[in-house]
Image: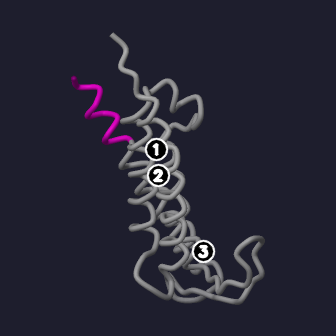
Amino acid sequence: MKVNDVILKSVVRGVVFIVFTLGMYLFFAGHNAPGGGFIGGLVLGSGIVLLYLTYDIETVHKGMPFDFKKVAAIGVLLATGSAIASVFFDVPFLTQTDGYYNLPLIGEKHLSTVTIFEAGVALTVVGTLVTIILNISEDE
């Protein structure tokens, strides 16, 4: 028997949009306020898990055809690459540079190389969280 869950799916679409927006805000706010790659990644990952809980795995994979193990691996490479890059510029390990840049839709933002490191952390957290949840759900 198929459950009529039109209301649940409609509400989740709006909630997931809000969760993804909050996750991106926390990611970008993390440099100057509480938040950052780890917290932003957790919020983004929880939005993806909410999609998996509401829809079946095949439907979510059609919309997001990512292998989350590869997403986690790319995140680790990005984070470690941004840390190791400082060595090639003959500065201490994890040294950062920064500047102000005009970004479309969000205006002028203060960005630094820490943002690249934080993006790597966020991708690692999202990939790991979703992979763990998917592996737990396969055990049933």
Give the dominant element type of the magenta stretch: helix, strand or loop: helix
The image quadrant that residue 105 belongs to is bottom right
Residue on which disc 2 sits: 15
In the rendered structure, which amino acid carries the disc numbered 3?
Ala
Instruction: Kindly report which numbered mark, 3 or 1, lies closer to the viewer in this rendering.
Output: 1
Residue on which disc 1 sits: 11
| x and y, in percent, of residue 57 in the image | 44, 27
| Mark drawn on residue 66 | none
| Other residues around mark 3 within 10 Å, as few (<14) / some (14–19) / many (≥20) | some
Where, quadrant-wise, is the C terminus in this rendering? top left
- Range covered by the magenta-colored residues: 131-140
Question: Label 1's element?
Answer: helix
| Other residues around mark 1 within 10 Å, as few (<14) / some (14–19) / many (≥20) | few
Q: Mark 3 or mark 2: name the one nearer the start of the chain.
A: 2
| Other residues around mark 2 within 10 Å, as few (<14) / some (14–19) / many (≥20) | some
Question: Which one is nearer the viewer's eye here, 61 or 99?
Answer: 61
The CA distance from mark 2 to mark 1 is: 6 Å
Q: Is residue 75 above or below residue 39?
A: above
Question: Which one is nearer the viewer's eye here, 74 or 136?
Answer: 136
Any magenta on residue 18?
Answer: no
Q: Is residue 32 above or below residue 63?
A: below
In this picture the colour scheme is one colour
Q: Which residue is pictured at 60% across the width and 74% down the height?
A: 85
Q: Which residue is pictured at 46% across the width and 51% down the height?
A: 15
Q: Is residue 125 above or below residue 95?
A: above
In the rendered structure, which amino acid carries the disc numbered 2?
Val
Question: Label 3's element?
Answer: helix
Question: Which one is nearer the viewer's eye here, 62 or 120?
Answer: 62
Any magenta on residue 135?
Answer: yes
Residue on which disc 3 sits: 85
